[in-house]
Amino acid sequence: MGRDATRTLGVLMNRTTLYATVLPSLLAGTSRYALPELVRPANPSSHGVLEMLSLMGQALRFERPAAPDSFIVEQEIKDERKIVADNLRRPLIRLLTAKNVTDHPARALARSFDLLRLRPHPFDLPSIDAFVRSNAERLGPTAQHWSDRQKSDAETQSYFDPELLDESSWAHATLSRRVAYLEQRRRDGADAARTLLESTWAQESADARFRLLETLQTGLSTTDQPFLNTLEKDRAPRVRALAAKFLARLGAGGESPALHACLERIKQSKSGLIRKHIALQIELPANVKDQTASRWILQAFADVSFRELAGAVRLEEEELIAAAAKDEPLLLALALIATSDLRLDLLELVVAHLPNAWEKIVESGLDTLGTMGESQRQCWQEIVVHPYRKDLPTIYHLWDWLQRIIDAQAPASVMSTVLHAKLLKKIPEHECAVWFELLAAMCPAAQRQELRQQLADFDQSVTVTPVVLLDILDGMENNRTHD
Amino acid sequence: MSLTLERIEALAPDQVSLAAARKLLKPSSWPTLAEGDGLVWGECQGSGATPYRVVVNEADAGYKCTCPSRKFPCKHSLALMWMRAEKSSAFVSAPVPDWVKDWLSRRRGASSAAAKDEDEAQPKARPSIRLTEIPEAPTTADPKAEQRAAATRERNRLEREAAVIAGLDDLDTWLSDQVQHGMANFVAQAAQVCRTIAQRLVDAKAPGLAGRLDALPTRLFTLPGPVRPSAAIRELGQVHLISQAYRRASELPELLAADARQAVGWTITRETLLSDSGALRVNAKWRVFAVLSEAQPDRLRRVETWLWCESDSDSTPSCGVLIDFVPISTGAATGGYLVGDQIDAQLIFYRSSIPLRAQIMTLNKGAEHSSEPLAVPAEGLRASYAQYERALAQLPWLGTIPLTFRSANVRRNGEQLYIDDDESGFSLPLHTSQATHALPLASVGPIDGIGLWNGYEFTLAWAETQLGPWVCS
């Protein structure tokens, strides 16, 4: 370096020499492997050591990086969903990565992606990775592939958009997608759907058999009976129990042990002065305390159908409800059975006698509405909320449970009640943030503007998240965009 | 609630802050002043490389400024409120920009800075805007004092030069020891041995070299194990080159000598740079294509704002980087600008063989976010890399440099991603930190873009793809 003519190289050095003699010495240490005398150093006492160091260092810097021999060929994913609009991407990322936010906005967004057949922009998947992993099946094949990227080839599968599933591909989709597909097929043609189920039954795992069998609840008829009879000897106890329940609903099969156990707990008496009415009540086991009674009821009556219970006490279904009118625990049992049986007509009759059915059902620990479709779930919500009218509960836990179990927008009637009752103003101040997120998540599109107006009365610090959520949901519905 | 002078007085931490804010009431200090949705925001050129961005919520006087001040609110926030309260400057109605929306989404509540409690045991004097109107006593120049100050500065400079040379002598001894024991041994003890020599160099007033050696262990351990010894040769070899170049600066070209002084740790103040008539100035539109930040061992965060020249002229350089240092304790992780912002400004570059580092000399217009595609030269990755090699020949201790490319692909080999130029078969490994974020690019086909090469890994900063732009986050 520099113009010092005295510092000429003693020997012309080529790259090979440098790598062969200098590099090993520097790596191992000159105390073990002396450097060759190739450079006349400025400082003789240094023996050119540091010059060699710099020269070797620069030679290494000029080495071009080695390219790998081969690269992975990326799997091509066919994804026909449209990518969400550009103007929504940044707000989506902000919302989905914000701290101290409940999961209601994320759940609402996942639903919206699914219903509108939209998908997140592929470049945003890393930023919203947690959201994608939790909701991959609702976000399209690209998101599912992203979510599975760390799985082995054996664990991954072909990716199908649920709306593109057909009889040839349905068996390869994820279980929840297969359940949804079969439910829809049961609505369209129950017998054909059952035949499809039977075709893969033998290869299914116990969990898959149970969940797929549940779909037979939709459109259950006597034509399903022969298949149900074959399940008497199924390896999985809960599959056997579910099949027995369906058979009992069809009026076939013997008395189930569950029904027998329930009947032992139901006491019959007669009431009334002029006309005697049958009155029924549950006698709780001695070891069941009041606070756990609802949970016991859920477990005790889980495998009993309305028809078989009514038949066992020799009453019509409506008469059964009337007979239970004065017994809250039995009314709760009937509400749970009506829910399980998808008998919303009966549920409505029960709730007329049990206006706080919502709270009692929450107490029972019910955590799923089974195979109810979205419109049925919304109808269910209307039924349990209706008795409260404008005196809606302000206990967050109740609404949080309701929103999770419904997993859909609230029906317009429920949201109207919420807004007209000015529920927002009755919420404890320290809970406003979580409440507003929940209300924004459940609000139907037509009522979002009214909710925004009510939110405007509150501090921005508690409304920014719900307002952003409403804006994004509106944006997703208004702007379907490019691929 | 609109902003009032009384409110501002109540918010101000002390009288000094108000006095400092008064000096910023000139519209010329604020290339951007805007309003919208109950917010006011602006950009104010401070002493840092990037202007500070300030936003105030009029309803509750919530505020945010990107300056590193530890006073809350800072003088910039106070000045913005002041101008708004007095309506002394025009605020343009504009859509709320993304950087303001980001702040809004992170706000935890209304400003907690309320009027001072009158019942405090030891009430302090409330800052007064009226007091800031009292002009400061003018100072008269004293030629003799100036001479004495100049002599002191020269004496200090000579003392420092001597200290640096002594430090470099010790550095040579230290380097010789490391070579004697070998690089494998050095890597194993890097943290310990580098700390010692770095401290010595700090004492020798060579903070640039000290910082380079202090950061060396971390740098080595971001690399795969097998390459660390050879990487150590590269790094220590550079340190020796800098040391030798500094000693023999008089024999070197002027710009290379300046590079050596800068590498050792001599700094140039903004004022000195602005007054350097020979410094390169480029007036153009610049796009922010990357903002990187890194915590340093000295408890400062180094924030790099990388700019790409978008003007039509062939002026060089085509890239610049604004470097700010903010205390880590302020919590600021980025500078004022966001990736995608376009700045119309005159940059002034620090003297260098390969000019990159710059400051904003004049902001012609406040930054605006641009959604236009980033246009890069029509050359492939290999050609761009060849430019890097030419630059390295001119500046042997060249650090990070931008590389542009057209029609390259992101590809995977195991867990490692590469940017691969199909046509030439040339590829560069992507920084391991991008293994997840850049992975979606592996499925989109050829891309054009720009990134930063540090001699070991390529940090992809911006890519134009068939699905739109991808930017490093």
Image (cartoon, rainbow, N blue to C red):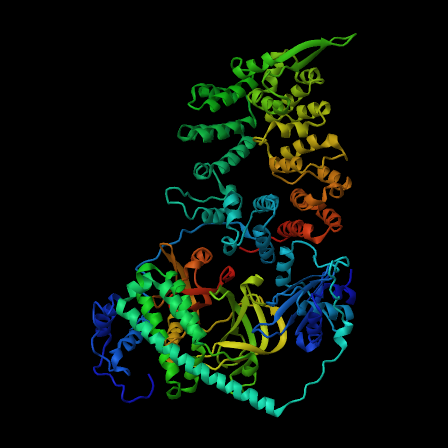
Q: Residue furthest bottom?
A: B143
Relative to A449, residue A30 above or below: below
Residue A288 falls in image quadrant: top right
Residue B251 visible in the snapshot: yes
- Report whether A283 appears left or right of B120: left
Residue B125 falls in image quadrant: bottom right
Q: Quadrant of the N terminus of chain B?
A: bottom right
Q: How many marks?
A: 0
Relative to A159, residue B261 above or below: below
In the image, B263 versus A115, the foreground residue is B263
**In the image, residue B330 lies at what x, y percent?**
58, 63
Q: What residue is at 44 percent from the left and 50 percent from the top?
A: A77
Q: What residue is at 34 percent from the left and 68 percent from the top?
A: B424
Residue B4 visible in the snapshot: no
Q: What residue is at 53 percent from the left and 27 percent from the top?
A: A216
**In the image, residue A346 lies at what x, y percent?**
67, 23
**In the image, residue B214 lies at what x, y percent?**
41, 67
- Report whether A447 appears left or right of A289: right
- Report whether B123 appears left or right of B451: right
Q: Residue furthest front?
A: B121
In the image, B91 versus A124, the foreground residue is B91
Q: What residue is at 52 percent from the left and 44 percent from the top?
A: A134
**In the image, residue A324 lies at what x, y percent?**
69, 17
Residue A482 falls in image quadrant: bottom right
Relative to A329, residue B81 above or below: below
- Report whether A160 appears left or right of A423: left
In the image, B87 versus A336, the foreground residue is B87
